[in-house]
Image: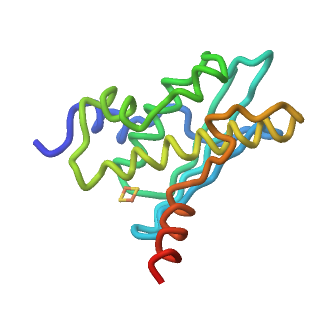
Amino acid sequence: MLYSEKVMDHFRHPRNVGEIENADGVGEVGNPVCGDIMKIYLKIENGIIEDVKFKTFGCGSAIASSSMATELIKGKSVEDALELTNKAVVEALDGLPARKIHCSVLAEDAIKLALLDYYKKNGLEVPEKIKNYKTHEEEEAEAAEAEE
Ligand code: FES
């Protein structure tokens, strides 16, 4: 079977779908190759992620990844959320096929960008980890430029 039961479960019954009005942080990323888009909304109180919602216009693995990623950071501190990697998302999903790993990368990127948005909006010092944070999209664009 190509997809784990967990992937199928989160794809069929995604958790935390929707948006948050007046969110404390919003992050949006897209993958230029497949055209999939993911948007993450965070509600943060006293440094804790009280609520998180997502909207994903993308493949099943992107939906499962967003669902799992939001579950993993809900109720956690912003510091903990900063540590979330796409690898952790893939592990929590019991794996993704190799050509679907980029879908989990979207989830990590969208969360990091939403956190960056939160730090900036609140005039907080941006942690080293995301200071120079770029989406993979930007990295690819830069790499492409460098090749020219
Ligand atoms: Fe692009 Fe899944 S195929 S996010």
Against 22, is 84 above or below? above
Q: Is residue 100 above or below residue 117?
A: below
Q: Residue furthest bottom?
A: 148
The colour style of the image is rainbow
Residue pictured at 56% horizontal, 54% vertical: 135
- Residue appearing at x 50%, y 41% in the figure: 108
Residue closest to the eye, 117 or 9: 117
Tally the marks: 0
Residue 24 lies in what quarter of the image?
top right
| In-image side of 53 versus 11 (left or right) | right
Asked whether, in this view, residue 70 is left or right of residue 102, the answer is right
**In this view, 60 is above or below 33:** above
The furthest residue to the left: 1
Q: Report the image quarter containing ligand 1.
A: bottom left
Residue 141: % across, % down = 53, 70
Q: Could you say which is closer to the camera, residue 111 or residue 51?
A: 111
Residue shown at 61%/16% (left/top)? Answer: 75
Q: Nearer the viewer, residue 30 or 11?
A: 30
In the rendered structure, the answer to whether residue 42 lies left or right of residue 92 reads right
In the rendered image, residue 79, in percent from the top left (x then y), is placed at 64, 21
Q: Position of residue 73 (x, y in %)?
A: 55, 24
Which residue extends farthest right?
A: 123
Please name whichever residue, 77 or 52, is drawn nearer the observer in this view of the structure.
77
Quadrant in the picture for the N terminus: top left
Quadrant of the rendered structure where residue 128 is? top right
- Who's the residue at 40% across and 35% down the image? 13
Q: Position of residue 96 (x, y in %)?
A: 25, 42
Is 96 on the left-hand or right-hand side of 147? left
